[in-house]
Image (spheres, rainbow, N blue to C red):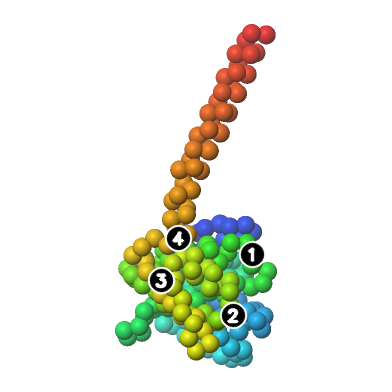
Amino acid sequence: MALKETVRTAPGYVRTLIQQEELPLLRDHLLRLDAESRYDRFNGFLDDSFIERYAARCAEDGTVIVAYIVDGVVRGAAELHPPEGDSLPEVAFSVEASARRQGVGTVLFRRLIAEARWKAYTRLRITTGAENHAMRGLANKFGAHLQFRHGESTGTIDLTKPPEAELADLAAAPFTAGRAILSFNSTCWKLISSMYGNRAA
């Protein structure tokens, strides 16, 4: 079972794929990745047949897929792979070029962490290419401590502590609420002034 809440982010939305017939959407998304994105995602140039087998395995092994969807098409995906034996559950991300620099990765990451906590996971493993700077930056934002090894960066995320991104949201909340209250008070004051002004006239 997975979280069902849909999160909207212009121009698309983020939700977990929970229907079996939806899972080929991941395959189609991965096949659309350009050569550089495919290299970053899988740490190498891989042919279409590998990606088709990979997506089919995700549909069978209980991998949670959080998708960024635009007009019914998956343009970004976050994968939460179940642990195998004594290993940690592992996460992976991919975003098509058309959906980059829109905050999609952050929304996907936050939703995936929520899914992991719902499953009572306490730590996650993340692996990314050494040259995938965007992914490394996003992982660091959410508390991952990456180490370079054998041409790739690997690390873990501790889910028992709020990551930096969540702490930033909490820190901003009082100021956001304060601005909203000031705005509300200003609107009320203008309305009252207008009412009394009309009476005076």
In primary-sequence order, the first of circles 3 and 4 is 3
What element does badge 4 sit on? helix
What element does badge 1 sit on? loop
Label 3 sits on residue: 157
In primary-sequence order, the first of circles 1 and 4 is 1
Label 2 sits on residue: 131
Q: Position of residue 187 (x, y in %)?
A: 58, 28
**Crowding near the residue tagged with mark 2, few <14, some 14–19, many ≥20 C-alpha atoms within 10 Å:** some
* Mark 4 residue type: Glu
In primary-sequence order, the first of circles 1 and 2 is 1
* Picture disc at residue 198: none
For the N terminus, the quadrant is bottom left
Q: CA distance from mark 1 to mark 4?
A: 20 Å
Q: Vertical placement of 185 versus 75: above or below?
A: above
Which dot, 1 or 2, sits closer to the camera?
2
Pick the residue in front: 139 or 194.
139
Q: CA distance from mark 4 to mark 2?
A: 23 Å
Q: Is residue 179 left or right of residue 123?
A: right
Label 1 sits on residue: 101
Q: CA distance from mark 3 to mark 4?
A: 11 Å
Label 4 sits on residue: 164
Q: CA distance from mark 3 to mark 1?
A: 23 Å
* Mark 1 residue type: Arg
**Crowding near the residue tagged with mark 4, few <14, some 14–19, many ≥20 C-alpha atoms within 10 Å:** some
The residue positioned 43% from the left and 55% from the top of the image is 167
The residue positioned 36% from the left and 72% from the top of the image is 123
